[in-house]
Amino acid sequence: MGMSKKDLSRKKANIKARIEELEQKARMDPLKRNRAVHDELEQLKKKLAEAD
C-alpha cells in the first residue's frame, strides 16, 4: 500500500527541515572539512527533488 497524501507531505516537510539545519552547518564549513554534512545535504536535496 502506498503512502497517503498526509504522509507524503509530512515526509517532505521533515526533509525540508533537515535541509535547513544542514545548510546552516554547511555554511559554517566552507572548506568542506566535515564531508558527511555536505554529502547528506546533497542526498536530501535529491530526495526532495524526486518527491516533487
Image: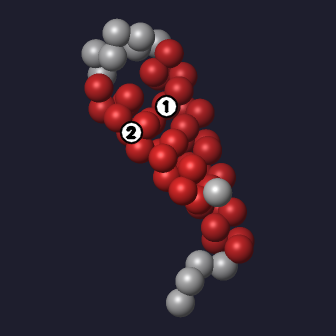
Q: Amino acid at mark 1?
A: Leu
Local packing at callout 2 (Cα closer than 10 Å; few below 14, some 14-19, many 20+) is: some
Q: Amino acid at mark 2?
A: Glu
Above or below: residue 26 compared with residue 3: above
Residue pictured at 38% horizontal, 29% vertical: 38
Residue pictured at 29% horizontal, 26% vertical: 35
Residue pictured at 49% horizontal, 52% vertical: 47
Local packing at callout 1 (Cα closer than 10 Å; few below 14, some 14-19, many 20+) is: some
Where residue 4 appears, as percent x and y from the top left, is 66, 79
Above or below: residue 24 compared with residue 40: above
Where residue 51 appears, as percent x and y from the top left, is 59, 59
| Cα distance between the residues tagged 1 and 2 | 8 Å
**Image position of 41 (left or right of 9):** left
Dot 1 lies on which element?
helix
Determine which of the numbered discs, if any, sits on residue 40 in the image: 2
Front position in the image: 28 or 31: 31
Image quadrant for the C terminus?
A: bottom right
Front position in the image: 24 or 2: 2
Q: Which residue is denoted by mark 1 in the rendering?
A: 22
**Image position of 26 (left or right of 6):** left
**What residue occupies the far top of the structure in this picture?**
31
Q: Quadrant of residue 50?
A: bottom right
Q: Quadrant of residue 5?
A: bottom right
Confirm or deny contact between disc 1 and disc 2 (CB under 8 A).
yes
**Image position of 13 (left or right of 1):** right
Dot 2 lies on which element?
helix
Where residue 44 appears, as percent x and y from the top left, is 47, 45
Query: Earlier along the polypeptide chain: callout 1 or callout 2?
Result: 1
